[in-house]
Amino acid sequence: MLVKKASKASRLRALLASPELEFLCEVHNGLSAKIVEEAGFKGMWGSGLSISAALGVRDNNEASWTEVLDVVDFIGGNTSIPLLLDGDTGYGNFNNVRRLVKKLGQLGVAGVAIEDKVFPKTNSFLREERQPLADMEEFAGKIKAAKDSQEDPDFCVVARVEALIAGWGLGEALKRADAYHKAGADAILIHSKKSVPDEVLAFQKEWGKRCPVVIVPTKYYATPTDVFRDAGFSVAIWANHLVRSAAAAMQQTARQIAKEQTLLNVEERIVPVAEIFRLQGDAELEEAEKRYLPGAGKTVSAVILAASRGKELGALTEALPKAMLPIGGRPLLYRQVDTLNEVGIKDITIVRGFRKELISAPNLRFADNDAYETTQELSSLAKGLEKVSGATLVAYGDILYKKYIPELLLAADDDVLLAVDSDWRERRRDDRYGDFVSCDRAYRKEQFDHEVRLKTMGPAVPAADTHGEWIGLLKLSAKGLAAVKDAMAELAKRPDFNKLRMAALLNELVARGVSVKVQYVRGHWLDVDDVTDLGAAGSF
Protein backbone atom coordinates (compact mmCIF):
# COMPACT_ATOMS: atom_id res chain seq x y z
CA MET A 1 0.00 0.00 0.00
CA LEU A 2 1.41 3.37 -1.02
CA VAL A 3 1.70 5.93 1.77
CA LYS A 4 1.06 9.48 0.62
CA LYS A 5 3.86 11.82 1.60
CA ALA A 6 2.84 14.84 3.63
CA SER A 7 2.63 17.98 1.53
CA LYS A 8 5.08 20.81 2.04
CA ALA A 9 2.22 22.97 3.28
CA SER A 10 1.23 20.42 5.92
CA ARG A 11 4.86 20.17 7.07
CA LEU A 12 5.10 23.95 7.44
CA ARG A 13 1.83 23.95 9.38
CA ALA A 14 3.30 21.29 11.67
CA LEU A 15 6.36 23.47 12.28
CA LEU A 16 4.16 26.42 13.22
CA ALA A 17 2.13 24.23 15.60
CA SER A 18 5.12 22.44 17.11
CA PRO A 19 5.42 22.64 20.91
CA GLU A 20 9.18 23.12 20.37
CA LEU A 21 10.87 26.20 18.95
CA GLU A 22 11.49 25.54 15.24
CA PHE A 23 13.76 27.34 12.80
CA LEU A 24 13.61 28.54 9.21
CA CYS A 25 16.74 29.65 7.33
CA GLU A 26 16.90 32.29 4.63
CA VAL A 27 17.27 31.24 0.99
CA HIS A 28 17.51 33.43 -2.08
CA ASN A 29 18.01 31.02 -5.00
CA GLY A 30 18.12 27.32 -5.83
CA LEU A 31 21.73 26.87 -4.71
CA SER A 32 21.23 28.44 -1.29
CA ALA A 33 18.05 26.36 -0.88
CA LYS A 34 19.99 23.16 -1.53
CA ILE A 35 22.62 24.19 1.01
CA VAL A 36 19.97 24.95 3.65
CA GLU A 37 18.29 21.59 3.16
CA GLU A 38 21.61 19.74 3.39
CA ALA A 39 22.44 21.65 6.58
CA GLY A 40 19.46 19.98 8.23
CA PHE A 41 16.84 22.74 8.37
CA LYS A 42 13.22 21.60 8.28
CA GLY A 43 12.04 24.66 6.39
CA MET A 44 13.12 27.75 4.45
CA TRP A 45 12.39 31.46 4.51
CA GLY A 46 12.24 33.06 1.06
CA SER A 47 13.58 36.42 2.16
CA GLY A 48 12.43 39.46 0.19
CA LEU A 49 15.61 41.31 1.11
CA SER A 50 17.86 38.43 0.05
CA ILE A 51 16.03 37.67 -3.19
CA SER A 52 16.13 41.37 -4.10
CA ALA A 53 19.83 41.54 -3.25
CA ALA A 54 20.58 38.46 -5.35
CA LEU A 55 18.74 40.12 -8.25
CA GLY A 56 20.74 43.30 -7.71
CA VAL A 57 17.80 45.55 -6.82
CA ARG A 58 16.54 47.26 -3.67
CA ASP A 59 14.11 45.74 -1.19
CA ASN A 60 11.42 48.25 -2.17
CA ASN A 61 9.32 46.05 -4.48
CA GLU A 62 11.68 46.87 -7.33
CA ALA A 63 11.57 43.18 -8.25
CA SER A 64 8.11 42.38 -9.60
CA TRP A 65 6.15 39.56 -8.04
CA THR A 66 6.53 37.48 -11.21
CA GLU A 67 10.32 37.89 -11.02
CA VAL A 68 10.20 36.74 -7.40
CA LEU A 69 8.09 33.74 -8.40
CA ASP A 70 10.70 32.77 -11.00
CA VAL A 71 13.23 32.54 -8.16
CA VAL A 72 10.75 30.69 -5.97
CA ASP A 73 10.23 28.11 -8.70
CA PHE A 74 13.96 27.27 -8.67
CA ILE A 75 14.00 27.14 -4.87
CA GLY A 76 11.12 24.70 -4.67
CA GLY A 77 12.31 22.60 -7.59
CA ASN A 78 15.67 22.07 -5.94
CA THR A 79 14.48 21.00 -2.48
CA SER A 80 12.00 18.83 -0.59
CA ILE A 81 11.50 20.99 2.51
CA PRO A 82 8.74 23.61 2.81
CA LEU A 83 9.20 27.27 1.89
CA LEU A 84 7.56 30.21 3.63
CA LEU A 85 7.80 33.10 1.20
CA ASP A 86 8.25 36.69 2.29
CA GLY A 87 5.41 38.14 0.20
CA ASP A 88 6.06 41.75 1.26
CA THR A 89 2.69 43.58 1.24
CA GLY A 90 1.11 41.12 -1.15
CA TYR A 91 2.15 43.21 -4.18
CA GLY A 92 -1.00 45.32 -4.19
CA ASN A 93 -4.55 45.06 -2.91
CA PHE A 94 -6.68 42.03 -1.99
CA ASN A 95 -7.00 41.03 -5.66
CA ASN A 96 -3.24 40.89 -6.13
CA VAL A 97 -3.02 38.77 -2.98
CA ARG A 98 -5.60 36.32 -4.31
CA ARG A 99 -3.63 35.81 -7.51
CA LEU A 100 -0.37 35.55 -5.58
CA VAL A 101 -1.71 32.78 -3.32
CA LYS A 102 -3.06 30.81 -6.28
CA LYS A 103 0.29 31.01 -8.10
CA LEU A 104 2.20 30.01 -4.96
CA GLY A 105 -0.07 27.00 -4.57
CA GLN A 106 0.65 25.97 -8.16
CA LEU A 107 4.38 26.17 -7.44
CA GLY A 108 4.08 24.03 -4.30
CA VAL A 109 5.01 26.84 -1.92
CA ALA A 110 3.95 26.01 1.65
CA GLY A 111 2.98 29.47 2.83
CA VAL A 112 3.32 33.22 2.52
CA ALA A 113 3.94 36.03 5.00
CA ILE A 114 2.49 39.43 4.13
CA GLU A 115 3.15 42.62 6.08
CA ASP A 116 0.77 45.41 6.99
CA LYS A 117 2.60 48.26 5.28
CA VAL A 118 1.76 50.38 2.29
CA PHE A 119 2.82 49.19 -1.18
CA PRO A 120 5.54 49.71 -2.34
CA LYS A 121 7.19 48.76 0.93
CA THR A 122 10.44 49.98 2.46
CA ASN A 123 12.69 47.49 4.21
CA SER A 124 11.89 47.40 7.92
CA PHE A 125 15.41 48.36 8.95
CA LEU A 126 15.51 51.54 6.83
CA ARG A 127 14.20 55.02 7.65
CA GLU A 128 11.59 54.85 10.40
CA GLU A 129 9.74 57.86 8.93
CA ARG A 130 9.16 55.87 5.71
CA GLN A 131 7.31 52.97 7.33
CA PRO A 132 3.63 53.92 6.81
CA LEU A 133 1.27 51.16 7.91
CA ALA A 134 -1.70 49.92 5.92
CA ASP A 135 -5.22 50.47 7.16
CA MET A 136 -5.89 47.65 9.62
CA GLU A 137 -9.30 46.71 8.20
CA GLU A 138 -8.03 46.82 4.64
CA PHE A 139 -5.13 44.53 5.54
CA ALA A 140 -7.45 42.14 7.38
CA GLY A 141 -9.34 41.93 4.09
CA LYS A 142 -6.11 40.86 2.38
CA ILE A 143 -5.68 38.07 4.93
CA LYS A 144 -9.24 36.87 4.36
CA ALA A 145 -8.79 37.04 0.58
CA ALA A 146 -5.58 34.99 0.87
CA LYS A 147 -7.28 32.28 2.96
CA ASP A 148 -10.30 32.17 0.64
CA SER A 149 -8.00 31.70 -2.38
CA GLN A 150 -5.85 28.82 -1.18
CA GLU A 151 -6.53 25.43 -2.73
CA ASP A 152 -4.46 23.39 -0.27
CA PRO A 153 -6.20 23.55 3.13
CA ASP A 154 -2.80 23.40 4.81
CA PHE A 155 -1.37 26.41 2.99
CA CYS A 156 -0.20 28.86 5.67
CA VAL A 157 -0.84 32.60 5.69
CA VAL A 158 1.33 34.46 8.19
CA ALA A 159 0.40 38.04 9.07
CA ARG A 160 3.48 40.16 9.67
CA VAL A 161 2.77 42.97 12.12
CA GLU A 162 4.95 46.05 11.59
CA ALA A 163 3.54 48.30 14.31
CA LEU A 164 6.67 48.00 16.46
CA ILE A 165 8.90 48.74 13.45
CA ALA A 166 6.88 51.91 12.72
CA GLY A 167 7.02 53.01 16.35
CA TRP A 168 3.28 52.66 17.02
CA GLY A 169 3.79 50.68 20.22
CA LEU A 170 2.70 47.43 21.81
CA GLY A 171 -1.01 48.29 22.06
CA GLU A 172 -1.29 48.88 18.32
CA ALA A 173 0.67 45.71 17.58
CA LEU A 174 -1.70 43.62 19.72
CA LYS A 175 -4.79 45.23 18.19
CA ARG A 176 -3.60 44.58 14.66
CA ALA A 177 -2.49 41.01 15.43
CA ASP A 178 -5.92 40.26 16.90
CA ALA A 179 -7.72 41.62 13.82
CA TYR A 180 -5.51 39.58 11.48
CA HIS A 181 -5.94 36.42 13.56
CA LYS A 182 -9.73 36.81 13.41
CA ALA A 183 -9.46 37.31 9.63
CA GLY A 184 -7.91 33.84 9.39
CA ALA A 185 -4.12 34.28 9.73
CA ASP A 186 -2.48 30.98 10.69
CA ALA A 187 0.33 32.72 12.58
CA ILE A 188 1.55 36.18 13.54
CA LEU A 189 5.05 37.38 12.72
CA ILE A 190 5.90 40.12 15.21
CA HIS A 191 8.78 42.25 13.99
CA SER A 192 11.16 44.52 15.92
CA LYS A 193 14.37 46.34 15.07
CA LYS A 194 15.58 46.91 18.61
CA SER A 195 18.87 45.29 19.63
CA VAL A 196 17.19 43.62 22.61
CA PRO A 197 14.10 41.35 22.50
CA ASP A 198 12.05 43.38 24.97
CA GLU A 199 9.35 44.34 22.46
CA VAL A 200 8.70 40.86 21.10
CA LEU A 201 8.82 39.32 24.58
CA ALA A 202 6.24 41.85 25.80
CA PHE A 203 4.05 41.04 22.80
CA GLN A 204 4.29 37.30 23.40
CA LYS A 205 3.42 37.70 27.10
CA GLU A 206 0.25 39.60 26.25
CA TRP A 207 -0.64 37.50 23.22
CA GLY A 208 -0.44 34.15 24.95
CA LYS A 209 -1.39 31.10 22.90
CA ARG A 210 -4.06 32.51 20.60
CA CYS A 211 -2.06 31.34 17.59
CA PRO A 212 1.62 30.62 16.72
CA VAL A 213 4.02 33.59 16.89
CA VAL A 214 7.04 33.89 14.59
CA ILE A 215 10.06 36.11 15.27
CA VAL A 216 13.02 37.37 13.22
CA PRO A 217 15.99 37.96 15.60
CA THR A 218 18.16 39.79 13.06
CA LYS A 219 18.69 42.85 15.28
CA TYR A 220 18.54 41.15 18.69
CA TYR A 221 20.82 38.32 17.56
CA ALA A 222 22.82 38.27 20.82
CA THR A 223 19.80 36.99 22.75
CA PRO A 224 20.27 33.35 23.86
CA THR A 225 17.96 31.10 21.90
CA ASP A 226 16.64 29.56 25.11
CA VAL A 227 14.99 32.91 25.88
CA PHE A 228 12.83 32.40 22.79
CA ARG A 229 12.07 28.84 23.79
CA ASP A 230 11.07 29.81 27.32
CA ALA A 231 8.82 32.59 25.99
CA GLY A 232 6.87 30.11 23.86
CA PHE A 233 7.60 31.41 20.38
CA SER A 234 6.80 28.92 17.62
CA VAL A 235 9.38 29.70 14.92
CA ALA A 236 12.55 31.78 14.70
CA ILE A 237 13.68 32.89 11.25
CA TRP A 238 17.39 33.37 10.47
CA ALA A 239 16.42 35.89 7.85
CA ASN A 240 19.32 37.10 5.70
CA HIS A 241 22.54 35.49 6.83
CA LEU A 242 23.32 33.38 3.78
CA VAL A 243 23.19 36.26 1.33
CA ARG A 244 25.28 38.38 3.71
CA SER A 245 27.90 35.65 4.16
CA ALA A 246 27.96 35.07 0.39
CA ALA A 247 28.50 38.79 -0.21
CA ALA A 248 31.41 38.86 2.24
CA ALA A 249 33.09 35.87 0.60
CA MET A 250 32.58 37.22 -2.93
CA GLN A 251 33.94 40.63 -1.98
CA GLN A 252 37.08 39.09 -0.49
CA THR A 253 37.68 36.83 -3.48
CA ALA A 254 36.98 39.54 -6.06
CA ARG A 255 39.35 41.99 -4.36
CA GLN A 256 42.11 39.40 -4.15
CA ILE A 257 41.80 38.35 -7.80
CA ALA A 258 41.70 41.98 -8.93
CA LYS A 259 44.81 42.78 -6.91
CA GLU A 260 46.89 39.69 -7.69
CA GLN A 261 45.67 39.01 -11.23
CA THR A 262 45.90 35.26 -10.69
CA LEU A 263 43.63 32.52 -9.38
CA LEU A 264 46.32 30.45 -7.72
CA ASN A 265 45.95 31.95 -4.25
CA VAL A 266 42.16 31.76 -4.09
CA GLU A 267 41.59 28.36 -5.66
CA GLU A 268 42.58 26.40 -2.56
CA ARG A 269 40.23 28.26 -0.18
CA ILE A 270 37.05 28.15 -2.21
CA VAL A 271 34.93 25.10 -2.90
CA PRO A 272 36.05 23.09 -5.91
CA VAL A 273 33.98 23.24 -9.05
CA ALA A 274 33.10 19.61 -8.35
CA GLU A 275 31.19 20.71 -5.24
CA ILE A 276 29.09 23.09 -7.31
CA PHE A 277 28.37 20.26 -9.72
CA ARG A 278 27.34 18.07 -6.77
CA LEU A 279 24.99 20.71 -5.40
CA GLN A 280 23.51 21.08 -8.87
CA GLY A 281 22.70 17.36 -8.89
CA ASP A 282 25.13 16.38 -11.63
CA ALA A 283 25.35 12.80 -10.32
CA GLU A 284 21.68 12.24 -11.16
CA LEU A 285 22.22 13.64 -14.66
CA GLU A 286 25.25 11.40 -15.14
CA GLU A 287 23.16 8.34 -14.28
CA ALA A 288 20.41 9.51 -16.60
CA GLU A 289 22.93 9.98 -19.42
CA LYS A 290 24.05 6.39 -18.96
CA ARG A 291 20.44 5.24 -19.36
CA TYR A 292 19.39 7.46 -22.23
CA LEU A 293 22.45 8.53 -24.26
CA PRO A 294 24.35 6.09 -26.47
CA GLY A 295 28.01 5.91 -25.56
CA ALA A 296 27.62 7.97 -22.39
CA GLY A 297 29.24 7.10 -19.09
CA LYS A 298 32.79 6.75 -20.42
CA THR A 299 35.26 7.98 -17.82
CA VAL A 300 38.97 8.69 -17.48
CA SER A 301 40.94 6.13 -15.50
CA ALA A 302 44.22 6.59 -13.66
CA VAL A 303 47.20 4.38 -12.95
CA ILE A 304 49.46 5.41 -10.07
CA LEU A 305 52.88 3.75 -9.83
CA ALA A 306 53.58 3.20 -6.11
CA ALA A 307 55.56 -0.04 -5.91
CA SER A 308 58.92 1.22 -4.69
CA ARG A 309 60.09 1.43 -1.12
CA GLY A 310 61.94 4.74 -1.45
CA LYS A 311 65.34 3.76 -0.04
CA GLU A 312 66.58 7.36 -0.25
CA LEU A 313 64.43 8.12 2.79
CA GLY A 314 66.33 5.63 4.93
CA ALA A 315 64.71 4.53 8.17
CA LEU A 316 61.47 6.29 7.33
CA THR A 317 60.68 3.67 4.69
CA GLU A 318 62.05 0.55 6.36
CA ALA A 319 58.53 -0.58 7.21
CA LEU A 320 56.41 1.81 5.17
CA PRO A 321 56.25 2.45 1.40
CA LYS A 322 57.30 5.94 0.40
CA ALA A 323 53.87 6.60 -1.06
CA MET A 324 52.30 5.99 2.36
CA LEU A 325 54.43 8.48 4.28
CA PRO A 326 52.15 10.88 6.16
CA ILE A 327 51.90 14.43 4.86
CA GLY A 328 49.98 16.54 7.34
CA GLY A 329 48.48 13.38 8.82
CA ARG A 330 47.35 11.85 5.50
CA PRO A 331 49.43 9.50 3.33
CA LEU A 332 51.13 11.04 0.30
CA LEU A 333 49.42 8.57 -2.04
CA TYR A 334 45.95 9.30 -0.72
CA ARG A 335 46.52 13.03 -1.07
CA GLN A 336 47.13 12.43 -4.77
CA VAL A 337 44.00 10.27 -4.94
CA ASP A 338 42.06 13.17 -3.38
CA THR A 339 43.31 15.52 -6.08
CA LEU A 340 42.34 13.09 -8.84
CA ASN A 341 38.89 12.69 -7.29
CA GLU A 342 38.49 16.48 -7.29
CA VAL A 343 39.06 16.61 -11.05
CA GLY A 344 36.55 13.80 -11.62
CA ILE A 345 38.81 10.75 -11.83
CA LYS A 346 37.36 8.02 -9.63
CA ASP A 347 38.51 4.85 -11.46
CA ILE A 348 42.03 4.60 -10.01
CA THR A 349 44.43 1.66 -10.09
CA ILE A 350 47.36 1.64 -7.65
CA VAL A 351 50.37 -0.49 -8.57
CA ARG A 352 51.72 -1.80 -5.27
CA GLY A 353 54.98 -3.53 -4.36
CA PHE A 354 56.89 -2.99 -1.12
CA ARG A 355 54.65 -3.68 1.90
CA LYS A 356 51.66 -3.83 -0.41
CA GLU A 357 49.34 -4.83 2.42
CA LEU A 358 49.71 -1.32 3.83
CA ILE A 359 48.18 0.21 0.71
CA SER A 360 44.48 -0.42 0.98
CA ALA A 361 41.49 1.85 0.65
CA PRO A 362 37.89 1.59 -0.56
CA ASN A 363 37.03 2.60 -4.11
CA LEU A 364 40.54 1.86 -5.39
CA ARG A 365 41.71 -0.93 -7.70
CA PHE A 366 45.07 -2.61 -7.14
CA ALA A 367 47.71 -4.29 -9.29
CA ASP A 368 50.79 -5.81 -7.69
CA ASN A 369 54.39 -5.79 -8.87
CA ASP A 370 55.84 -8.39 -6.55
CA ALA A 371 59.22 -8.11 -8.31
CA TYR A 372 59.53 -4.46 -7.28
CA GLU A 373 63.06 -4.93 -5.88
CA THR A 374 64.51 -6.02 -9.24
CA THR A 375 62.36 -3.99 -11.64
CA GLN A 376 61.76 -0.40 -12.60
CA GLU A 377 58.79 1.74 -13.62
CA LEU A 378 57.85 0.08 -16.91
CA SER A 379 57.34 -3.26 -15.19
CA SER A 380 54.94 -1.59 -12.77
CA LEU A 381 53.22 0.26 -15.60
CA ALA A 382 52.67 -3.02 -17.47
CA LYS A 383 50.79 -4.36 -14.43
CA GLY A 384 48.66 -1.26 -14.19
CA LEU A 385 47.79 -1.08 -17.88
CA GLU A 386 46.17 -4.52 -17.62
CA LYS A 387 43.43 -2.89 -15.54
CA VAL A 388 42.49 0.03 -17.79
CA SER A 389 41.03 0.80 -21.19
CA GLY A 390 40.17 4.12 -22.76
CA ALA A 391 41.46 7.51 -21.67
CA THR A 392 43.96 7.16 -18.82
CA LEU A 393 46.13 9.38 -16.63
CA VAL A 394 49.46 7.82 -15.57
CA ALA A 395 51.16 9.23 -12.47
CA TYR A 396 54.11 8.54 -10.21
CA GLY A 397 53.02 7.65 -6.71
CA ASP A 398 55.37 10.01 -4.88
CA ILE A 399 54.27 13.37 -6.28
CA LEU A 400 51.96 16.19 -5.22
CA TYR A 401 50.56 18.78 -7.59
CA LYS A 402 47.97 21.52 -7.81
CA LYS A 403 44.75 20.24 -9.32
CA TYR A 404 44.84 22.69 -12.21
CA ILE A 405 47.65 20.61 -13.75
CA PRO A 406 45.62 17.43 -14.35
CA GLU A 407 42.71 19.69 -15.35
CA LEU A 408 44.88 21.13 -18.12
CA LEU A 409 45.82 17.65 -19.32
CA LEU A 410 42.25 16.36 -19.25
CA ALA A 411 40.93 19.39 -21.13
CA ALA A 412 43.28 18.80 -24.07
CA ASP A 413 42.43 16.62 -27.09
CA ASP A 414 45.98 15.32 -27.55
CA ASP A 415 46.52 11.56 -27.56
CA VAL A 416 49.74 11.65 -25.53
CA LEU A 417 50.37 14.69 -23.35
CA LEU A 418 53.05 15.28 -20.72
CA ALA A 419 53.06 17.88 -17.96
CA VAL A 420 56.54 19.45 -18.04
CA ASP A 421 57.92 21.98 -15.57
CA SER A 422 59.85 24.69 -17.40
CA ASP A 423 61.46 25.84 -14.12
CA TRP A 424 63.78 22.83 -14.03
CA ARG A 425 67.20 24.31 -13.35
CA GLU A 426 67.11 24.43 -9.56
CA ARG A 427 66.11 20.75 -9.40
CA ARG A 428 68.90 19.41 -11.64
CA ARG A 429 71.56 17.71 -9.53
CA ASP A 430 74.26 15.23 -10.49
CA ASP A 431 73.17 12.84 -7.72
CA ARG A 432 69.50 12.78 -8.72
CA TYR A 433 67.70 10.96 -11.51
CA GLY A 434 65.53 13.36 -13.45
CA ASP A 435 63.09 12.97 -16.34
CA PHE A 436 64.52 15.96 -18.19
CA VAL A 437 63.09 16.70 -21.60
CA SER A 438 64.19 18.29 -24.82
CA CYS A 439 61.35 19.70 -26.92
CA ASP A 440 60.94 21.29 -30.31
CA ARG A 441 60.64 24.68 -28.61
CA ALA A 442 61.06 26.19 -25.17
CA TYR A 443 58.42 27.61 -22.87
CA ARG A 444 57.15 31.03 -23.86
CA LYS A 445 55.11 33.25 -21.59
CA GLU A 446 52.44 33.84 -24.19
CA GLN A 447 52.16 30.13 -25.09
CA PHE A 448 49.02 28.31 -23.94
CA ASP A 449 48.53 25.61 -26.58
CA HIS A 450 49.79 22.03 -26.63
CA GLU A 451 51.69 22.24 -29.89
CA VAL A 452 55.05 21.70 -28.21
CA ARG A 453 56.42 18.24 -29.04
CA LEU A 454 58.79 16.03 -27.12
CA LYS A 455 62.07 15.21 -28.84
CA THR A 456 63.78 13.11 -26.14
CA MET A 457 63.68 12.45 -22.41
CA GLY A 458 66.10 11.20 -19.76
CA PRO A 459 68.67 12.20 -17.16
CA ALA A 460 71.38 12.45 -19.80
CA VAL A 461 69.75 15.22 -21.82
CA PRO A 462 72.39 17.99 -21.96
CA ALA A 463 71.53 21.11 -19.99
CA ALA A 464 71.89 23.19 -23.14
CA ASP A 465 69.14 21.13 -24.80
CA THR A 466 66.87 20.81 -21.74
CA HIS A 467 63.54 22.64 -21.80
CA GLY A 468 62.03 21.24 -18.64
CA GLU A 469 61.42 18.28 -16.36
CA TRP A 470 58.53 15.85 -16.68
CA ILE A 471 56.64 16.01 -13.38
CA GLY A 472 55.33 12.44 -13.51
CA LEU A 473 51.89 13.06 -15.07
CA LEU A 474 50.98 11.62 -18.47
CA LYS A 475 47.54 11.85 -20.12
CA LEU A 476 46.57 9.27 -22.73
CA SER A 477 43.48 9.23 -24.90
CA ALA A 478 42.07 5.85 -25.91
CA LYS A 479 44.21 6.09 -29.06
CA GLY A 480 47.23 7.14 -27.01
CA LEU A 481 46.75 4.21 -24.63
CA ALA A 482 46.69 1.81 -27.57
CA ALA A 483 49.95 3.33 -28.86
CA VAL A 484 51.53 2.94 -25.41
CA LYS A 485 50.46 -0.71 -25.15
CA ASP A 486 51.96 -1.41 -28.59
CA ALA A 487 55.24 0.26 -27.60
CA MET A 488 55.26 -1.61 -24.27
CA ALA A 489 54.85 -4.93 -26.09
CA GLU A 490 57.89 -4.15 -28.22
CA LEU A 491 59.98 -2.97 -25.26
CA ALA A 492 59.06 -6.11 -23.30
CA LYS A 493 61.11 -8.12 -25.83
CA ARG A 494 64.29 -6.41 -24.67
CA PRO A 495 66.44 -8.35 -22.18
CA ASP A 496 66.81 -5.24 -20.03
CA PHE A 497 63.06 -4.52 -19.88
CA ASN A 498 62.97 -4.87 -16.08
CA LYS A 499 65.47 -2.03 -15.80
CA LEU A 500 63.63 0.39 -18.07
CA ARG A 501 62.13 3.59 -16.75
CA MET A 502 59.38 5.80 -18.15
CA ALA A 503 61.83 7.75 -20.33
CA ALA A 504 62.40 4.63 -22.40
CA LEU A 505 58.69 4.40 -23.17
CA LEU A 506 58.34 8.06 -24.15
CA ASN A 507 61.45 7.90 -26.33
CA GLU A 508 60.09 4.75 -27.99
CA LEU A 509 56.85 6.52 -28.81
CA VAL A 510 58.76 9.41 -30.38
CA ALA A 511 60.88 6.96 -32.39
CA ARG A 512 57.67 5.35 -33.68
CA GLY A 513 56.41 8.70 -34.94
CA VAL A 514 53.79 9.15 -32.25
CA SER A 515 53.16 12.81 -31.54
CA VAL A 516 54.02 13.23 -27.86
CA LYS A 517 52.82 16.69 -26.84
CA VAL A 518 54.01 18.81 -23.91
CA GLN A 519 51.97 21.03 -21.58
CA TYR A 520 54.34 23.42 -19.85
CA VAL A 521 53.72 24.38 -16.22
CA ARG A 522 55.84 26.49 -13.91
CA GLY A 523 56.20 24.83 -10.52
CA HIS A 524 53.16 23.94 -8.37
CA TRP A 525 54.25 20.32 -7.95
CA LEU A 526 56.58 18.38 -5.69
CA ASP A 527 58.48 15.11 -6.12
CA VAL A 528 59.18 13.52 -2.73
CA ASP A 529 62.64 12.03 -3.22
CA ASP A 530 64.35 12.67 0.10
CA VAL A 531 63.91 14.03 3.63
CA THR A 532 64.15 17.63 2.41
CA ASP A 533 61.32 17.03 -0.04
CA LEU A 534 59.29 15.36 2.68
CA GLY A 535 59.61 18.44 4.86
CA ALA A 536 58.57 20.69 1.98
CA ALA A 537 55.52 18.50 1.31
CA GLY A 538 54.09 19.43 4.70
CA SER A 539 53.61 23.03 3.59
CA PHE A 540 52.95 22.37 -0.12
Image: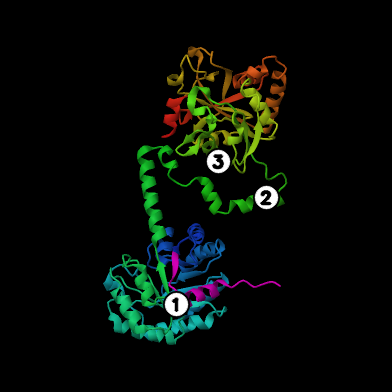
Q: Is residue 384 something that shows in the picture? A: yes
Tell me the number on the disc at residue 343.
3
The residue to which callout 2 is attached is 289
Q: Residues within 10 Å of mark 2 (few under 14, many from 20)?
A: some
Q: Residues within 10 Å of mark 3 (few under 14, many from 20)?
A: some
Q: What element carries label 2?
A: helix
Q: Nearer the viewer, residue 246 or 398?
A: 398
Q: How is the image coloured?
A: rainbow
Please tell me whether residue 390 is drawn above or below residue 515 in the rendered image.
Answer: below
Residue 426 within the segment the image draws in magenta: no
Looking at the rendering, the stretch of residues picked out in magenta corresponds to: 1-25
The residue to which callout 1 is attached is 158
Residue 505 point in image, percent of width and height: 64, 21
Q: How crowded is mark 1: few (under 14 residues within 10 Å), some or many (20 or more)?
A: many
Q: Which residue is drawn at 64% across and 29% down?
A: 415
First in sequence, mark 2 or 1: give its number.
Answer: 1
Q: Which of 146 and 315 is in front in this view?
A: 315
First in sequence, mark 2 or 3: give its number.
Answer: 2
The three-letter amino acid code for the residue at tag 3 is Val
First in sequence, mark 1 or 3: give its number.
Answer: 1
Gap between marks 2 and 3, in whole Å? 19 Å
Gap between marks 1 and 3, in whole Å? 46 Å
Q: In which quarter of the image is the N terminus?
A: bottom right
- The answer to which image quadrant residue 59 occupies is bottom left
Q: What element carries label 3?
A: loop
Q: Residue at x 37, y 75 (%)?
A: 230
